[in-house]
Each structure stands twice: as C-alpha cells, then as structure tokens.
C-alpha cells in the first residue's frame, strides 16, 4: 500500500467497506425459546426435570459463547478488513456488555454484529442501534423500563459513559431520559416498542420540552457540543496517545460535528494529522491483550493455538472478550500491565517459540543478561524434577530470517528488531540480543550457518522485551 501514499492508505484503512467481507457466520450458536414458550414447556416438567433442563441450556450457552471468543480472535487474524475488527473491539469496550448477564450466545453475537456493522458509520445511529439491541436492553435493564416505574440504568450510562461524560448533565436529566426510554423492551427475543408501557407525558431534557421519546433524547445529546468532544477525545486516546490538548480535541470534535457525526471523516482527520506522526504518538501505548496475541501470531506466521489456550491467555492477560468486567469496560493502556499479566506476556512468546504451555513456564527476561541465554530449556526452577521443554515452535522460523540473508549479523539483528518493535532497544539490551545469534556482529548472516536454537532464542528475546508490549 506504500504506493498509495499516506492519504490513500488512510482512506483504504478507514473506508474498508470497499473490500469484500470474508466473515463466515458461526453455526454453533444456541437458540433460546421465547420466554412464554419456555414457561409452557417448563410447566409440563417436574421440579428436578426443570432444574436439569435449565442447567443444560445454561451449559450449552456458555460453551457457545466461549467458542465465539477464539472465533473472533482468529477472524481478527484472517480478515481483509483489520481496521473494522479493531474498531469493533474499541466499541466493545466503549459500549460494554457482558455475556455473563446476557447469557445467550445468539444475542451476544447479534451485539457483536451491531458494533461491527456500525463501527465506521454514524455515531448517532450507532448509539441508537446499541441501545435497542437485545444485549444492551438486557445488560442495562431497559427491557424493564416501564411507565410509572422508570429504570434509569441505560439513561445514566448513556450520558455518563457512552456520550457526554460525568459532570455534563444533571440527575433530573437522567430521570427525564429514563421516562423517554420507557416501553423500549424485548419480545420474542428481539427489540419491541410496547406503546402501552411508554410514558407519553411532558418532559424536559437539555432545553427541549414536550412529549419526548427515544429519538428526541438521542438528538438532544448529539446537539450538545460536549458529545463530539467526548467521543473525539476517547477515540484519540485509544488510537494515538493519552491526554491530548483541549485545542486538539476541539479541532477533532469540529470535524465530527461538521460531518453530522459520521465517523469516517473524524478517523481520517485523526490519522492524517501531523500529531498522529509525532514522536509522542510513536510506541507510547501498551497493546491490548487481543492486539498482543493476534500480532504475535500474525508476525510469526504461527499456527493459531487451540481454542482453550486462547481463552486462558485472554483471561490471564485481563481481556476476557465479550465479557468486560463492568459497564465501564476495560481501562486499557497502563492498566493492561500488572505483575501477573506482565509475566504472562513474557511467557506467551515462550509458548509460541517452544510449544511449552505458557501457564507452566517461567520465561527469562532480556534484561537478565546471560541468564536469558538458557531459555530454550524451558525448565521451571520452581518445579521438582522439571524436564526441559522440547523445542516445537508453532511457526517456521526460516522465512523470518531469510529476508535478512547476506547482511552482516549486526545489521540483520537490528533490522529484525525494527520490524517487531515500536521503540529501539537500548545498548545493553541490544548487546544481549545480538549475542543470542552466536556469531560476531560483522560476520555474514546465513540461517544455514546459525543453529536453529539460536535463531529461536534471539527471536524469543525480542518478543519478551518491554518494547514489544508497545504500539
């Protein structure tokens, strides 16, 4: 895509609809009977049979949702619209919904499709579609929002987390919005507007007065300039860097307002801005667990690990897909790193390089100097009678190095590090990394003259650096 130039590349990235969609719909999702039909079926059974039936259905739903998680990760790796999946992942954290409460694999997948279909579209339309999706109606309880008994959960989070941010609305406005959202519920598993349960009385919201309904409230939110600022700032902080200046946020928000909340112009403006290519924007963010796993598999051309290993890895790294910890979603960036997740980020490369399970491995660090050179044994010193791990990489190491054949070892090592890292190694790190090749720096690099274990060891060291965690 280099021949397209910066603008052409950005346009291809953002306007991904021009490329064919390769998605293959999952065929293992589990249907849930309509609640009325379910009650009729259960009424015909004894108590023990009803309990067993419920437990079996719950088990099948859990299995189906758990299968969706590695399915999505695998699709992130193979799609020819990678930015669509990255945007969908962003919206998944922004409009957080957890399958533990939804408990229905078809509803969870429908929610994923709602986010995916509107990922680069119109923000106003996306907000409305999300709010009316069965998953969100269940998760934030708007299906129980009725005239005379308003439920404020969706209204509150819509204002606080999804569109405006704390401090830009009042409690009265939450209450009035909740009244406007009454009657929007579920029937037969899908969205339904129950007119008789809608509060059609006079309301006041952000200066608008009258018998306000769903669309009136959404429109009023979009009319407030704070909404464009809020979502522009959040997108910038996710894709570029944290703490942008107010002037920069205002500039991006003006683009979004000027485009009537169409997201493509905003995304293009972000990625074409000089600030996006500044030193501050380079390698200053920590990869999300999903990006970390998908990238390491893609860069190495590795086999996609077994489904259960992907699920274990994502949970251990702190991003259980389709099941964010709360309505706020994942905080991201620095919060991806703690003592446990950092150790796992160093152990996962060992799994890819050696085939040794990452939850049973202790990985030496690059900054441990010569101690790191014995990594290929993979023994865990905390285990009695631990055996060295067999070197069974999940990828073919040769193609990674072959393109550097003929260079001197030092140049080949440096070029390889630049392919994988967002920031350069310091001199001490580079010395340890270079020593892993087992040859003098000025010697000609040829993979036939370097031991396979040394090629794997050097690559393993590279993938275990703090710098590899950055993007």
Image: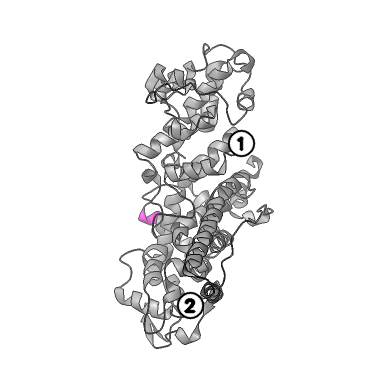
User: As drawn, is 428 to the left or to the right of 70?
Assistant: left
Question: Which quarter of the rendered picture does the N terminus lie within?
Answer: top right
Between discs 2 and 1, the one toward the N terminus:
2
Can the viewer see residue 130? Answer: no
Apparent side of residue 9 relative to residue 233 in the rendered image (left or right)? right
The residue that appears at 44% across and 52% down in the rendered structure is 236
Q: Is residue 20 left or right of residue 348?
A: right
Does the magenta run of residues contain 20? Answer: no
Residue 55 drawn at (x, y percent): 49, 60
Task: Please tell me whether residue 46 is drawn above or below residue 350 in the rendered image.
Answer: below
Q: Residue 89, how many percent across, how many down?
A: 51, 53
Q: Is residue 255 positioned above or below 320 on the image?
A: below
Coloring scheme of the render?
A: one colour
In percent of width and height, residue 262 lies at 54, 64
Q: Secondary structure at mark 1?
A: loop
Label 1 sits on residue: 303
- Residue 184: mark: 2
Residue beneath the point at 62% across and 16% down: 446
**Mark 2, other Cα within 10 Å: few <14 / some 14–19 / many ≥20:** many
Q: Is residue 97 above or below residue 151?
A: above
Which segment is the magenta one?
244-248
Name the dominant secondary structure of the magenta segment.
Answer: helix
Whole-angstrom CA distance, mark 2 to mark 1, is 45 Å
In the rendered image, which quarter is residue 166 located in?
bottom left
Residue 245 part of the magenta segment: yes
Residue 362, percent from left and from top: 42, 28
In the rendered structure, the answer to whether residue 345 lies left or right of residue 57 reads: left
Q: Is residue 25 visible?
A: yes
């Amino acid at each position: 895509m280099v021949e397209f130039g910066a603008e052409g590349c950005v346009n291809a990235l953002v306007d991904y609809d021009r490329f064919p969609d390769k998605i293959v719909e999952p065929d293992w999702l589990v249907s849930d009977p309509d609640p009325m039909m379910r009650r009729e079926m259960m009424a015909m059974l004894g108590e023990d049979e009803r309990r067993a039936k419920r437990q079996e259905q719950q088990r099948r739903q859990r299995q189906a949702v758990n299968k969706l998680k590695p399915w999505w990760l695998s699709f992130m790796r193979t799609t020819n619209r990678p930015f669509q999946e990255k945007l969908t992942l962003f919206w998944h954290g922004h409009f957080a919904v957890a399958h533990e409460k939804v408990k229905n694999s078809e509803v969870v997948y429908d929610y994923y499709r709602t986010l995916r279909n509107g990922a680069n579209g119109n923000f106003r339309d996306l907000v409305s579609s999300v709010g009316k999706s069965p998953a969100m109606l269940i998760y934030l309880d708007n299906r129980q929002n009725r005239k005379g008994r308003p439920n404020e959960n969706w209204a509150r989070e819509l204002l606080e987390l999804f569109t405006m941010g704390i401090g830009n609305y009042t409690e009265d406005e939450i209450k009035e919005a909740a009244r406007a959202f009454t009657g929007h519920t579920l029937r037969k598993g899908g969205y339904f507007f129950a007119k008789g349960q809608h509060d059609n009385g006079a309301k006041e919201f952000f200066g608008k007065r009258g018998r306000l309904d769903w669309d009136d409230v959404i429109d009023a939110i979009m009319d407030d300039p704070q909404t464009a600022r809020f979502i522009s700032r959040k997108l910038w902080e996710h894709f570029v860097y944290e703490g942008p200046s107010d002037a920069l946020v205002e500039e991006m928000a003006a683009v979004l307002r000027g485009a009537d909340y169409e997201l493509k112009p905003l995304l293009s403006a972000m990625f074409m801005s000089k600030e996006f290519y500044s030193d501050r924007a380079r390698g200053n963010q920590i990869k999300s667990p999903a990006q970390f796993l998908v990238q390491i598999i893609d860069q190495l051309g590795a086999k996609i690990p077994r489904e259960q290993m992907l699920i274990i890895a994502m949970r251990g790294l702190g991003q259980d897909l389709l099941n964010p910890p709360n309505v706020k979603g994942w905080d991201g960036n620095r919060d991806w790193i703690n003592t446990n997740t950092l150790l796992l980020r160093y152990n996962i490369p060992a799994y890819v390089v050696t085939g040794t399970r990452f939850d049973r491995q202790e990985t030496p660090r690059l900054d441990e100097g010569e101690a790191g050179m014995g990594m290929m044994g993979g023994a865990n010193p905390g285990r009695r009678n631990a055996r060295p791990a067999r070197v069974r990489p999940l990828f073919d190491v040769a193609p990674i190095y072959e393109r550097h054949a003929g260079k001197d070892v030092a140049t080949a090592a440096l070029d390889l590090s630049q392919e994988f890292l967002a920031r350069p190694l310091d001199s001490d790190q580079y010395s340890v990394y270079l020593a892993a090749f087992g040859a003098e720096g000025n010697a000609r690099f040829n993979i036939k003259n370097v031991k396979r274990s040394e090629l794997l060891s050097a690559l393993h060291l590279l993938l275990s650096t703090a710098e590899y965690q950055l993007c």
